[in-house]
Amino acid sequence: MGILRLSPRSPAFTSLTTAHVSHLRSLLSSPTSLLSPLDGSATSDDLTAFNVDWMGKYAGKSQVLVKPKTTKELSTVVKWCHDRNVAIVPQGGNTGLVGGSTPIHDELILCLSNLNAVRSFDPVSGILTAEAGIILEQADSFLASKGFIFPLDLGAKGSCQIGGNVATNAGGLRLLRYGSLRGSVLGLEVVLPDGRIWNGLSGLRKDNTGYDLKQLFIGSEGSIGIITAISILCPRRPTSTDVAVFSVPSYAACLKVFSQAKAHLGEILSAFEMFDATSYEAVKKHGGGGTGKKVFGDESEGPFYCLVETGGSNAEHDSEKISSLFETLLSDSLILDGVLAQDASQAHNLWQIREECPSALSAAGKAYKYDLSVPVEKMYEVVERMKKRMESLEWVGGKVKDVAGFGHMGDGNLHLNVVATEFSEEVQSAIEPFVYELTAEYNGSISAEHGLGAMKAPYISYSQSPASIELMKRLKKTFDPKGIMNPYKFIL
Amino acid sequence: MGILRLSPRSPAFTSLTTAHVSHLRSLLSSPTSLLSPLDGSATSDDLTAFNVDWMGKYAGKSQVLVKPKTTKELSTVVKWCHDRNVAIVPQGGNTGLVGGSTPIHDELILCLSNLNAVRSFDPVSGILTAEAGIILEQADSFLASKGFIFPLDLGAKGSCQIGGNVATNAGGLRLLRYGSLRGSVLGLEVVLPDGRIWNGLSGLRKDNTGYDLKQLFIGSEGSIGIITAISILCPRRPTSTDVAVFSVPSYAACLKVFSQAKAHLGEILSAFEMFDATSYEAVKKHGGGGTGKKVFGDESEGPFYCLVETGGSNAEHDSEKISSLFETLLSDSLILDGVLAQDASQAHNLWQIREECPSALSAAGKAYKYDLSVPVEKMYEVVERMKKRMESLEWVGGKVKDVAGFGHMGDGNLHLNVVATEFSEEVQSAIEPFVYELTAEYNGSISAEHGLGAMKAPYISYSQSPASIELMKRLKKTFDPKGIMNPYKFIL
């Protein structure tokens, strides 16, 4: 799986023994809250799903899994670890892509799954207060029943947890409409590295009384505390939704389609996604069953596709706006063709084309995946330049099957995939650090939304200045002087 | 003006002398960049507008005003101060309400007015990069010429500066629509307390590479660095705007009007403001000239008024939505009457009623002003309980003329005014800390948007836990170990 560049185990951390496990168990309310081969309560295999990430790329060797049932209990465990220099990896749904939620060595795994209650919901303000371990899709279903929507959506919604979403500052499919979690999260409850509970849960949209501490925890990837509950401002659920996919003759035309979409759809535009022909071919070949994936005639298939979604409060008005967009795009020859979903099932089908791009490209070969922020005008140049590099090595059609790009165009967020026949050091070295240098050249970010984790921690200097990294190290030290929180990752 | 509860001067800071001024002057490119009575380049009177806040409530005694022309020059000044333990107060438009931007004693005033260039604007992404000293209204006018809008609007727009807006995390009139600056600010350039320039300017909507350092500076009130430039995501300017004011029979009905407005107007709702009859009477009596302030017949004037604004991309659709809201409100007897602006001038006039509430109440007597966040359902209870307290003291009609409330109802942000005949310790002691205790009882915030400054710094514990305050002190110490940045304020 290539070179993972992981840090060696730090001798500063305590290795857990059977005696430790026995003591720790005495602090927990239920015997099912601690699983360990050390005292025979579990086999090593039982811990595999927690030690290894879903891609099988990162494999830790933790012997102790704790699943506290309350914030108080979690706080007791963290204090116990703090007092004994025991390293901890907090884990939500373990759906990350950068090796951030699995142990690197033998860290104690603190799993949030048992903290999964909705604490309150206020239908006047739309504020939800809920525990970290709730699955995103469950939180959204709960809100749907009240006429509201969770202001975040992403492919892993069926298994990712809202605490993990906040801890990694997840972006996803509707950031264009609902903005970043940094705007919608109103408060957090966090267990600090010394075990203290920080109650920063707030039901207020506005509060200017000191530094906004919660912002430090949002996107901190478990490095300075464990998020145990969040309060978040949820918008009303749109009562009307439209989805269209356009086939587009060039990336320059995609930019114009984006501009026209903003002008015609204004406040109802809720997503603007792009995928290239290579991605689309992979979906047609390897995507989920059904013939519905081919939605254009051969003659109208182009090199690019844009998916546009609207969400509004008046179906008639929304339909008029999207029809007017469609007409302009056709009359200005900005698109080759377009498909407008006629019902919810067709809308779902169109979304699936875009949502299946990552898995279809993985099915097409061994896919090296990069999550980059690049100014939207230049976004696709990154794909072209990577392809040119592979061509100059005369690898395309050989070691490398193809180079593909798709992503959240509305946010300038490109998912670049280099599909190889095999994972090898040779191919990886040709891609990295080239891809990071390329991104830095565009003043982009080497991690738009996936985070640093173990994978990108060594490369942070491509996106952050020495002054920033120095400040981040000071912050880490201020909050976690013993360095027990999610070590070997994020800020090294 | 009541008890200001200011901290005494710290002996740790250097008192500036003529020799200091001479040395400092040698570091600056222009003689007009430093004004000081110490070397005769200015009189004390020349510095009054910088030493005293606009309300005349806080009066410092600084002898040195520096107005750097570039970030580099500002950084040199800060380093010079840092090396000599010279305390600094950064100052933008000096429009704050809590004594945050004027010196408390003899701090050097660092004025941002000369840093006022637009560095770049990208019409594809809507990202503006501009220096801190630009006046908010000028930034918005620049954006208007490009078809965009600054995602913040407030009464002081004609004199406040965008750097100060970000440093105080200003909220204002359209937070309901465009969200908090924490979501829309993408990057900052900051001069750190040791004089280093931190370049955190970013043109990216998404960047998950480490702690989001800029969030620490947003709302930090100059306590850990000086914001010299910002990059901010600006939405398209709505092409259609409607404004209506409703006369409402009760606060319970206001809540229902709010709920109906959200349901009918959905994504085009851009502001929802409330003012009570006491505020409205003051505007009619003391507001700006013209007869247009009385917009309802006597029989339809009620105890409450709601102002609703929409901003959309299709005038016909927007007008249909607001008409349908109007019909529902009338048929459900939720309003006594309503006025829908027929043109831009009438819309401006309706907005003025709401915008003149603060100045009109100040003109009606000596107004004690509080800026509170309270859950919206309970918001007006705070006004009623304060009035009851004044009544129980038998002061209403005597020492206290009236108690009024208005504010950003959409955000649960109440501006409470106690209008007295005179400012006195007796009246102030009856209001404070009662008003803060009351706010704490509702789990509210004692500063929704105005910040802590000198005024509320001593009261932070009504809104923040001891653990939060301790973390904030650690952060202040981490960034500014010498404590030279805006001392005697914010975190004491």
Image: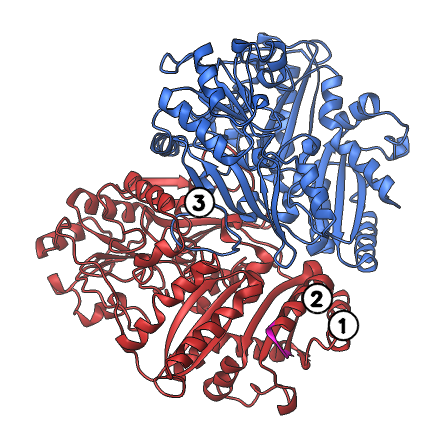
Chain colours: A red, B blue
Describe residue B427's horizontal placement relative to residue A391 as left or right: right
**Left or right: where B453 falls relative to B137:** left
Q: At x 56% / y 43%, what residue is drawn?
A: B181
User: Label 1: few (<14), some or many (≥20) within 10 Å?
Assistant: some
Q: Is residue B478 visible to the viewer in this orientation of the structure?
A: yes
Tag shown at residue A328: 1
Q: Chain of mark 2?
A: A
Q: Earlier in the sequence, mark 2 or mark 3?
A: 3
Q: Which residue is mark 2?
A: A260
Q: Is residue B187 above or below residue B190?
A: below
Query: Could you tell me which chain the residue with mark 3 belongs to?
Result: A
The answer to whether marks 1 and 2 sit on the same chain is yes
Residue B443 included in the magenta stretch of the image? no
For the residue labelled by badge 2, is the local secondary structure a helix, a strand or a loop? helix
Q: Are marks 3 and 1 in contact (CB under 8 Å)?
A: no
Seen in the picture, residue B466 relative to A48 is either above or below; the reply is above
At 38% from the left and 31% from the top, the residue drawn is B194
Residue type for callout 1: Thr
Q: What residue appears at the point 28 percent right and 56 percent down from the top-left corner?
A: A489
Distance between the alpha carbons at the discs numbered 3 and 1: 42 Å
Residue A236 appears in which quarter of the rendering?
Answer: bottom right
Where residue B7 appears, as percent x and y from the top left, is 44, 14
Tag 1, which chain? A
Image coordinates for residue B380, horizontal then vertical, percent: 65, 32
Left or right, residue B433 beside residue A400: right
Of labels 3 and 1, earlier in sequence is: 3
Q: Quadrant of residue B285?
A: top right
Q: Are marks 1 and 2 in contact (CB under 8 Å)?
A: yes
| Disc assigned to residue A215 | 3
Magenta residues, start to end: A247-251
Q: For the residue marked with disc 2, what is the amino acid?
A: Gln
